[in-house]
Amino acid sequence: MNNIAVRKVLGAIVLTILWILCFLYISPSLVIDFGGGATISLLLVAILAGLVIIFLYHQLYRSTAEVNKLSWTSVLTVSWLAVIIFFPFRTSEAGGAVGFFALLGGLAVCVLWVRFFSDEISLEA
């Protein structure tokens, strides 16, 4: 695996962890006040900005298609693990629905990693 591939995947994992920290450490009660009664949640702004940054990182950091797929798979894996570890399934009123989609996300993670581990994939340019 070449240096660009390793840097892209590790950079995506770091950005994803920073994005997850937005969920954990920004209080939902913090708002941005635009005046005149117009407010928006700081948590929502941080989450959307993080998603845009991760998307643009993958679009603008040039690499092969396989490295891009591996990077998106690692982003999905870290995000799925964060849901499994940090989401309060029992205490939330949406716990059942999130649990169902967490199971589907786990299936997607397994299918994607099986693809990477079972094929002869070359990450070289």
Image (cartoon, rainbow, N blue to C red):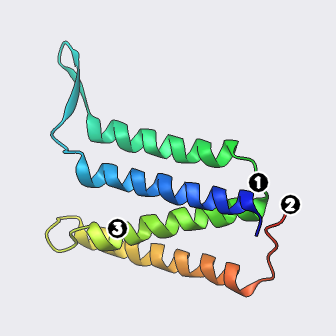
Dots 1, 2 in contact, CB < 8 A: yes
Q: Which residue is drawn at 40% across and 72% down?
A: 81
Query: Which residue lies most toward the bottom here?
Result: 118
Relative to 41, is 103 above or below? below
Which residue type does callout 2 highlight? Ala
Which percent across, then down, holds residue 79? Answer: 43, 64
Which percent across, then down, holds residue 40? Answer: 26, 30
Say whether residue 82 is visible.
yes
Which residue type does callout 1 highlight? Ser
Query: Disc 1 marks which residue?
Result: 63
Say whether residue 97 is visible.
no
Query: Disc 2 marks which residue?
Result: 125
Q: Quadrant of residue 4?
A: bottom right
Tell me the SS state at disc 1. loop
Query: Disc 3 marks which residue?
Result: 83
Q: What is the C-alpha distance between the residues marked 1 and 2?
A: 8 Å
Looking at the image, residue 92 sits to the left or right of residue 68; the answer is left
Q: Which of 110 and 37 is in front in this view?
A: 110
Point out the tag, 1 or 2, that comes first from the N-terminus.
Answer: 1
Looking at the image, residue 74 sits to the left or right of residue 101; the answer is right
Q: Label 2 neighbourhood size at 10 Å, few (<14), some (14-19), many (20+)? A: few
Point out the tag, 3 or 2, that comes first from the N-terminus.
Answer: 3
Which residue type does callout 3 highlight? Val
Q: What is the C-alpha distance between the residues marked 1 and 3?
A: 28 Å
